[in-house]
Amino acid sequence: MTSDDLTVIITTFKSEDKIESCLNSIGPNIKVIVVENSNNQEFKNYIENKYLNLECILTNENLGYGRANNIGLKKASTKYCLVLNPDTILEKKAIEAFLLSAEKNKNFYIIGPQQIKGEFLKNNNFKDNFNLYETEIVEGFAMFLNMEKFLDIGFFDENFFLYLEEVDLCKKVRNINGKILIDSNIKIFHFAGQSVNHVFSYQVELTRNWHWMWSLFYYNKKHFNYFYALFLIFPKFFSALFKIFIYRFILKNKKSEIYSKRLSGLYNAIIGKSSWYRPALD
C-alpha cells in the first residue's frame, strides 16, 4: 500500500490563513482535492500553482460542509480518502499511520485519529492491547474513509449545512454494523472552530448558532421521530426566547442577536424548512 491509494479532501470557505499550514503537513506526494465554497478564482489559481499535487474545485456558492465534501469524495478515484478540516495540522507520520492501520484492518469503514489539544471522543470501547479503539463517532475534522464500503450507503447527508454531518454518517455506518475505529497512534492537531478567517468571527458565531439548533432538531427527527426531536429541543427554544428579551433589556444587542439566530434555527427546523441561513461575509 502506498500514498497513491489515498486522496485528501478539504472543504474550505474563507480559510486562506489556515489552509497552507494544513497542506504543508500533508506533503507533496499525496493527492489533494480542495473544495472551495465560493467562486474565488484568485484563491484557486494561487493554491494550484503553489501545490502541484492539488486540484481546487470552486462550487460558486456556499454549499456547506457535507455537500462540498461529497463533491470531493465523488471526484476521487483512490481506495481511501481522508476528509480533513483546513484548521488541522498532521503530525509527521500521520498519513503513513493511517495507511498502516487500514492495511491491518481491511474491513473498516472509518478510522479517526487522536485529536491533539482537543476533546477526545467519548464512547470509546478498548478492543485490543495495541492502539485501536472501536467507537460510535469519529469527529469530522479528520475522517479516513474506506471508499468501497460507501458505494451502497453514500456519503454525507446534504440536508445538513453545518454540524452533525459526521455524527449522521457514523450512525448510518453503525446501522449496518460497520466498523468505526480510533487509532491513537495517529495524531492530528485541530484548531477547533478556526477554519474561517477571524475577521468574520461574529458572523460565523451567528451562523453556528443557527445551524447547530437546526441540525440538532433535524438529526433527531431523522433518526428517531418528530415528537422526540420536539421534546428534546423544547427547553432550548424557551431558553433562547428568554435570553433574547434579557439581553435586549440590558442592551447587549449582539448577545440578543445570537440567541435570535438560535431561535430562528429551531423554528425553521420545526416547520420543516431547509437549512437556508448563510453568513454574510462579503
Image (cartoon, grey):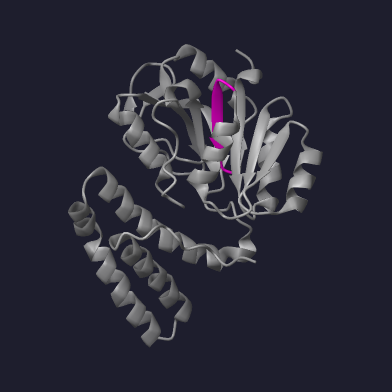
Front residue of this view, candidates 156 and 174: 156
One can see residue 86 in this view: no
Against 8, residue 16 (above or below) is: below
One can see residue 171 in this view: yes
Front residue of this view, candidates 206 and 93: 206
* Residue closest to the far right: 49
Q: Quadrant of the N terminus?
A: top right
User: Residue 186 location, x and y as percent?
Assistant: 53, 27
Q: Residue at x 46, y 52 (%)?
A: 161
Against 282, residue 29 (above or below) is: above
Q: Residue at x 32, y 52 (%)?
A: 218
Give the image quarter of residue 5. top right
Give the image quarter of residue 124. top left
Residues in magenta, as a range: 78-86
Q: Residue at x 61, y 53 (%)?
A: 13
Along the horizontal axis of the image, is 97 left or right of 251? right
* Magenta stretch holds residue 80: yes
Q: Quadrant of the C terminus?
A: bottom right
* Magenta stretch holds residue 141: no
User: Residue 131 location, x and y as percent?
Assistant: 44, 21
User: Residue 231 location, x and y as percent?
Assistant: 19, 58
